Structures are given as C-alpha cells and as structure tokens.
Image (cartoon, rainbow, N blue to C red):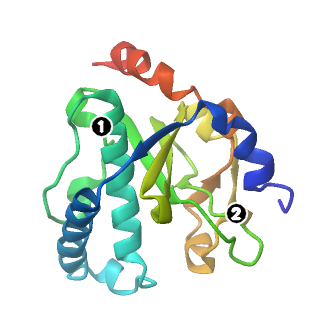
C-alpha cells in the first residue's frame, strides 16, 4: 500500500473539491464545543484510553460538517453535548437522509512518509461525504460523496496510522477519491435520497 499517497490518490482529483474558509470566531466556537464534548466523553471508559488527540479530531469533524452545511445552505450540525452512543448515526439525518460526513486533517508533513486518509467502517451501509481540514489555512476542502459500494471497495487497513485502531479490526482507511461524486452533485444526491 506504499503506492497510495496524496500525490497519487488525492491531488489529481482536487480540482473538483470545494474550498470553505473559516473565521477565527467560527474556529473558536468549534474548539469550545470540542472541549465540552471531550469532558463528556472522558466519563466513558472507552474514551479514557484515547491517544490524546480527541480535541483535534472533534474540531476537525465539526468543521467538516460546518463546511458542508455552509456549502449546501442547509443546517444540520448537532451542537449538543452527550454520550457517544447518542451520536452513532448518519450526520445528515436531520436533513432526512442517511449520509455521514468523514473529515480528516490534511497532512502538511506526512507521518513517517504516510499521508492521513479518512477512517471508515469496514462494512458501510450508508454514504459518506469526505472533507479535508487544513488548520494553517483555516480551510476545509469538501472532496465529494461515496456510496456504500465504493466505501466497501476502496479501503486499506495499512493506511491506518494508529496501531491500536488497526488492531481493533472494525475500521479501515478510505482511498477511492477518484470514485467520489463531486461536491456539485451532492445537493441532487441528497434530494434523491430523502426518506
């Protein structure tokens, strides 16, 4: 899997990505929410063994959702604070669709020569929209949408950077960015997917 990198699997398709920039106030709001959510999650046993990057992951995730919300012009972000089990559902459920949002921080300098790819379940039953967050630019790039068949095909455990996460065996990394529906197709996909 060493031949899978941003250079080969992300950058060639980046012309179709949508760029959403954030203000300091928006990032501050996202960070404050992440701090409060971390406090709640640390009460749960599973999160007490976390690697310590929870805040970064929470901020990246909520900014990915906010970027999509801004792009679509539709509100769906859930700012509530609660138990993990209450949030194990598709992110766009409030819009009447089973679609999730997967966000990852863009590797400005790859870890050990490995770029960060989004983490997904090995068995997917609903679509996911992928975003990359570039903290130094205060920018999120909306990459596109993958249906379950694409999610379940273009995955590689070797791209998971965390040995502990890889060892759990239920998650993998997604690399099929050339297969994504572009952001411009997402509004129509949402309309067609409504329950």
Give residue 172's quadrant in the image: bottom right
135 lies left or right of 22: right
Give residue 60's quadrant in the image: bottom left
Q: Is residue 125 visible?
A: no
Q: Residue at x 33, y 42 (%)?
A: 90
Q: Nearer the viewer, mark 1 or mark 2?
A: 1
Using the numbered discs, state the Cα–Cα distance from disc 1 to disc 2 in whole angstroms.
28 Å
Q: Residue 69 has which mark?
A: 1
Label 1 or label 2, whichever comes before in sequence order: 1
Q: Residue furthest right?
A: 3
Q: Residue at x 57, y 26 (%)?
A: 181
Q: Nearer the viewer, residue 29 or 57?
A: 29
Instruction: Assign a secondary structure to mark 1.
Output: helix
Asked if the residue under mark 2 is in contact with the one under mark 1, i.e. CB atoms within 8 Å, the reply is: no
Q: Nearer the viewer, residue 106 or 174?
A: 106
Task: Decide: is 142 above or below 58.
Answer: above
Q: Residue 25 in the image: state x and y as whole percent.
A: 22, 60
Q: Nearer the viewer, residue 66 or 145?
A: 66
Q: Is residue 57 visible?
A: yes
Q: Nearer the viewer, residue 74 or 91?
A: 74
Q: Residue 35 in the image: state x and y as whole percent.
A: 22, 75
The residue singled out by tag 2 in the image is: 159
Q: Residue 146 in the image: state x and y as whole percent.
A: 55, 33
Q: Residue at x 63, y 63 (%)?
A: 116
Give residue 111's quadrant in the image: bottom right
Q: Residue 101 in the image: state x and y as whole percent.
A: 41, 44
Residue neighbourhood size for the residue with mark 1, other residues' Cα within 10 Å, grouped as few (<14), some (14–19), many (≥20):
some
């Amino acid at each position: 899997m060493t031949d899978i990198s941003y250079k080969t699997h992300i950058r060639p398709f980046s012309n179709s990505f949508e760029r959403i920039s954030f203000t300091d106030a928006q990032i501050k709001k996202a960070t404050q929410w992440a701090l409060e959510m971390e406090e709640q999650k640390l009460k749960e046993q599973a999160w007490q063994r976390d690697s310590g990057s929870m805040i970064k992951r929470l901020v990246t995730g909520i900014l990915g959702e906010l970027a999509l919300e801004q792009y679509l012009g539709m509100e769906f972000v859930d700012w509530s604070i609660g138990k993990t089990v209450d949030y194990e559902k598709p992110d766009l459920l409030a819009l009447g669709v089973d679609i999730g949002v997967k966000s990852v921080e863009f590797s400005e300098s790859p870890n050990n020569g490995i770029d960060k790819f989004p983490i997904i379940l090995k068995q997917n039953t609903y679509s996911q929209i992928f975003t990359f967050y570039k903290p130094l630019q205060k920018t999120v790039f909306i990459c596109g949408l993958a249906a379950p068949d694409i999610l379940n095909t273009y995955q590689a455990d070797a791209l998971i950077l965390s040995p502990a996460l890889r060892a759990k065996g239920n998650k993998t990394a997604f690399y099929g960015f050339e297969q994504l529906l572009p952001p411009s197709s997402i509004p129509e996909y949402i309309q067609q997917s409504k329950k």
